[in-house]
């Protein structure tokens, strides 16, 4: 009796300790059993969307077509209220650039370019999203004029005023939550003359281009490519330029450098490359692709049932007005981060996430907040294999990792971040995340944000890798690039590398850090951790 009682107690303890895994396996098995019913429901939903599209063609001749499922998730944002998906990309140019010259450049290299079929290559820049029968559609502007999208900044019409870095941060702060004008495509490029930063002499004059756009007409990666590559002097408007590998946030671009509009791969030395090893790699790749469809239900269950760890930095969006601090850190050499990556044998993004984890630890302690063991961070991962030369490649994956904020050791945090990045870039998980995104987009627009907000990640990290050489626009050298992006999460941290420099910017909700000086300290703590990792780089991870 005693033995049986002890076994029963052990069994109960095992069930309790593994209850979450049991639920995952049970729900996965249930999905496999009811998969025919789920596929039938999905087929009905797709047919219903098709009927709505046919109805739009018959009754609404003004509509161009239905927006793709993954893009409609962003298009259903509050464009005419307080948008959650605005981004501002600022380019600092040397010298003076007139608004007429800028309009001619945009018109020649972007708006007037057509493909082989005679259609506008960047057609989505002439359209705006609208609603019809509970779904999102594209609609053309009635009278498209470049003067409505490429303009002088309102307060910069006074040519005698000199604009500073602090003014530029204030402008970005006002633009990221600014609502869009109705019946126009949600993008604009603002020209700000007479800009001078702290390193600028009294006679040096610079010009700033502030490109503000909404996620539905292009993500940060595609717009960076549009502004930095297509508008540069070395690119011809009639040349089809694919998305450069350096602007892909996945680790597939770790060994690619971009020069102008051409990409060259740096050879990677391998210990051996025998025929047998190559055959094994090919077989492994084929097996991995065959396993993905069978893993999707399991990965789907794991992600929707992943235990949420609420912390004091998760922001409730219900009936609350968004206000943000916008701060930027002085640019520093990107070679420092690359040296850490090479010495420790980790990914570039792992170094950045480890530095962020450390900075959040320090910031939590300074703010007196309860320190969670982990904090969810969302990483936008676009399609890697896209050959689309437009800026409409917005259907990415909702991928997230857990930042080890509760780990005290710097090397252990870096090890955890590298492990998380390794798991994140598994093909099955990326496919599952893309499937979830598309599945949400198939639903009527009123359900989009309901399902997305069921995953309350705390922040977003953007890792935008630009060319290592200096480029020119209309014979004006691009001196600096900064990206600030808004989101429905607590903060968005952007890393932009360009011309051997790294620029860090932060948009953070004022309810997380009430004072702007605390937001600045967060960026300084990130830089301090990068310095610490560099000093401790001789240790093995």
Image (tube, grey):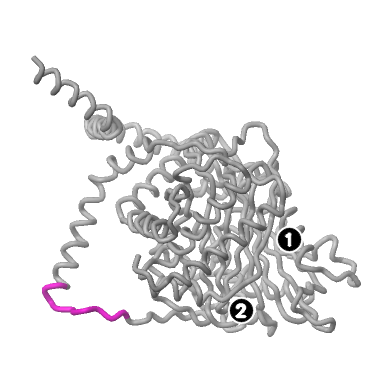
Q: Dot 2: within a 10 Å radius of its alpha carbon, few (fewer than 14), some, or many (20 or more) residues?
A: many
Task: Decide: is 184 above or below 469.
Answer: above
Is residue 270 shown in magenta? Answer: yes
- Residue at point 50% right, 77% down? 335
Q: Earlier in the sequence, mark 1 or mark 2?
A: 1
Image quarter (top left, top right, bottom left or bottom right) of the C terminus: bottom left
Specify the principal SS of the magenta part.
loop
Residue 120 visible from this viewpoint: no
Label disc, if present, on residue 366 of the rendered structure: none
| Mark 2, secondary structure of its residue | loop
Q: Position of residue 323 (x, y in %)?
A: 70, 45
Q: Is residue 34 left or right of residue 387?
A: left
Could you give the CA–CA distance between mark 1 and mark 2, rounded to whole angstroms? 25 Å
Instruction: Say which of 458 and 161 sits in front.
Output: 458
Task: Decide: is 525 above or below 241.
Answer: above
Q: Position of residue 27 (x, y in %)?
A: 28, 31
Disc 1 target residue? 169
Residue range of the region highlighted in magenta in the rendering: 268-277
Disc 2 target residue? 232
């Amino acid at each position: 009796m005693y033995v049986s009682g002890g076994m029963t107690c052990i069994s109960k303890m095992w069930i309790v300790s593994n209850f979450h895994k049991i639920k995952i396996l049970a729900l996965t098995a249930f999905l496999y059993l009811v998969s025919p019913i789920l596929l039938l429901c999905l087929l009905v939903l797709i047919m219903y969307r098709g009927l709505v599209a046919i109805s739009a063609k018959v009754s609404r001749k003004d509509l161009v077509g239905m927006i793709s499922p993954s893009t409609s998730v962003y298009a259903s944002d509050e464009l005419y209220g307080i948008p959650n998906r605005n981004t501002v990309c600022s380019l600092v140019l040397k010298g003076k650039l007139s608004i007429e010259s800028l309009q001619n450049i945009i018109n020649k290299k972007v708006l007037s370019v057509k493909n082989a079929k005679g259609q506008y290559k960047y057609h989505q820049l002439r359209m705006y999203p609208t609603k019809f029968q509970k779904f999102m559609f594209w609609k053309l502007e009635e009278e498209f004029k470049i003067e409505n999208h490429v303009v002088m900044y309102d307060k910069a019409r006074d040519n005698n005023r000199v604009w500073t870095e602090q003014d530029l941060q204030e402008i970005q702060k006002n633009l990221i939550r600014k609502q869009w004008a109705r019946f126009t495509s949600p993008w604009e490029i603002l020209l700000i003359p007479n800009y001078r930063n702290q390193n600028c002499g009294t006679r040096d004059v610079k010009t700033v281009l502030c490109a503000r756009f909404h996620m539905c007409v292009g993500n940060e990666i595609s717009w960076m490519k549009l502004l930095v590559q297509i508008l540069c002097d070395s690119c011809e408007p009639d040349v089809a330029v694919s998305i450069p590998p350096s602007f892909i946030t996945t680790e597939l671009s770790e060994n690619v450098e971009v020069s102008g509009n051409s990409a060259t791969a740096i050879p990677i030395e391998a210990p051996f490359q025998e025929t047998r090893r190559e055959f094994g790699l090919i077989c492994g790749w084929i097996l991995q692709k065959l396993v993905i469809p069978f893993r999707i239900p399991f990965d789907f269950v794991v992600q929707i049932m992943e235990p949420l760890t609420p912390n004091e930095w998760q922001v409730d969006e219900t009936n609350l007005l968004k206000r943000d601090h916008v701060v930027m850190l002085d640019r520093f050499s990107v070679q420092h981060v690359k040296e850490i990556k090479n010495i420790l044998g980790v990914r570039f993004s792992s170094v950045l996430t480890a530095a962020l984890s450390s900075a959040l630890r320090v910031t939590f302690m300074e703010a007196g907040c309860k320190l969670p063991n982990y904090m969810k961070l969302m990483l936008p991962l676009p399609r890697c294999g896209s050959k689309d030369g437009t800026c409409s490649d917005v259907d990415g994956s909702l991928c997230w990792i857990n930042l080890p904020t509760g780990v005290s050791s710097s090397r252990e945090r870096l090890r955890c971040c590298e492990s998380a990045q390794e798991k994140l870039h598994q093909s099955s998980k990326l496919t599952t995340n893309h499937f979830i995104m598309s599945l949400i987009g198939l639903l009527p627009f009123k359900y989009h944000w309901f399902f997305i907000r069921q995953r309350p990640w705390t922040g977003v990290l953007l890792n935008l890798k630009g060319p290592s050489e200096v480029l020119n626009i209309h014979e004006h050298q691009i001196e600096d690039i900064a990206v600030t992006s808004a989101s429905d999460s607590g903060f968005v941290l952007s890393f932009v590398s360009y011309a051997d420099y790294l620029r860090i910017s932060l948009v953070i909700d004022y309810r997380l850090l009430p004072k702007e000086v605390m937001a600045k300290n967060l960026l300084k703590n990130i830089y301090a951790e990068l310095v610490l990792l560099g000093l401790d780089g001789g240790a093995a991870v």
